[in-house]
Amino acid sequence: MHKSIQQYLSRYAEPNLPAPPEQGQRTYQWQWVVCIPCFNESSAFIEALPKTANVLIILVVNHPRGRDSGLNISLVESLPCEHPSLELGPHDRLITLDGDNRHILLVDRSTNQPGFNPKQGVGLARKLAADVALKWHVHGLIQSDWIAMTDADARLPETYFEALPEPKIDTPAVVYPFSHSQAELPEEQLALALYEVKLHHYVAGLLYAKSPYAHHSIGSCMAIRAKAYAQVRGIPKRAAGEDFYLLNKTNKLGKIRTLGLTSTVMLSPRRSDRTPFGTGQGVNTLSDEATPLNTQIFYPPRVFESLKGFLANIASGAQTFDALTAALPEEAITALKTLGVESALAHCQRHGPTPEQFQRQLHLWFDGFRTLKFIHQLAPPKTGLLSFDEWSVQSGNAALNPSEASQNLRALCYQTLTDD
């Protein structure tokens, strides 16, 4: 066992994780694992899971404290009735699915229980599932070191597991391409297209700027290696954004790869209030707008020009404040000062004696989170964003409707990310 895994399980893993089943007459072992948080879902999604053999699905049924959890009760009660099951603890059952060695580990943290801290929500549910996956991997029950993560409303491709890189390929995490299913109502489809443009235009902007943190961060479309998971101390316990922060930390261990389009995960366009922000809330908000095309949710192209200039200065070997801010607009220089770049430079000079080490230290400081803060300094979310019509003109996409713009940006992102 790697030292980081041993340390994580002893210090940072959640308490009272389900114990592995006793290996008696039946030996339990799986090749793959996928972790799914579940809040008020019907059991219908079970049938839509891939029929891949030798897979363990860790299902953490949960609810935020104070929220209705009626569907959770129905799911927890129905699964053991519909499938053979083995009780592992008061709230944990191993469910046998149809097929070749396919099981669900049902981790019930909802029924007759107070629920999770609302501020921790889905992040805690994902962490609990991944902690179990890591523990059972260490015990030899899960052979692959990949801990895959998705959501109950996602539809996974049949190539979901085989698309994961082999052990010899050195990458700490991967993200799956995603696409959304068609929405039922026209206003929801428009809202969905606008939200997809929002997601893709940000990553496209990072790619244009040559940011090392250019990748999508979608909780239902990612997988992380066991050692990397332990090294970043698991998933942040947050009600939203846990995927962004997990991948941001993981990217500092090595380059995150985007898998090919044949492994695309199909996401639901449904409205949702399960998390404070995300696709469900985004579709909710935009669908309810009287004029969604005028809703200001897009970053001005100029912010990515400033980001590109700063990153180009880093790449050129600049190590002083004046050299790193050369040719940048005044607002970008002010933003960098506000973020504390001058103190960061002193740190980089102490810990980066060679040009390569200095650059590495600077990229560790100016990570995906600080990149986002830099962009928000230039375009504050409440006052500095653009509507679709404004963004399409400024970005040279005025001839495209939201659906066409989304398709173009998606193609650009995935062509660049998968070719890289």
Image (spheres, rainbow, N blue to C red):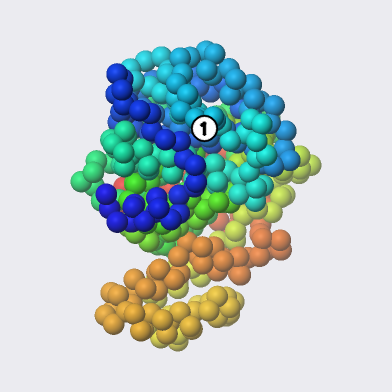
Relative height, residue 356 to residue 127 (above, below): below
Whether residue 297 is visible here, answered yes or no, is yes
Left or right position of 293 against 340: right
For residue 401, which quarter of the picture?
A: top right
**x and y, in percent, of residue 388 in the image:** 65, 50
Whether residue 396 is visible here, answered yes or no, is no
Question: At 49% from the left edge and 47% from the top edge, which residue is drawn?
Answer: 14
Tag 1, which secondary structure? strand
Residue to which mark 1 is pinned:
107
Nearer to me, 221 or 152: 152
Question: At 58% from the left edge and 17% from the top edge, which residue is drawn?
Answer: 78
Relative height, residue 364 to residue 117 (above, below): below
For residue 149, which quarter of the picture?
A: top left
**x and y, in percent, of residue 289 in the image:** 76, 43
Relative height, residue 159 to residue 339 (above, below): above
In the rendered image, the residue lying farthest to the right is 290
Q: Amino acid at mark 1?
A: Val
Question: At 63% from the left edge and 43% from the top edge, which residue is drawn?
Answer: 116
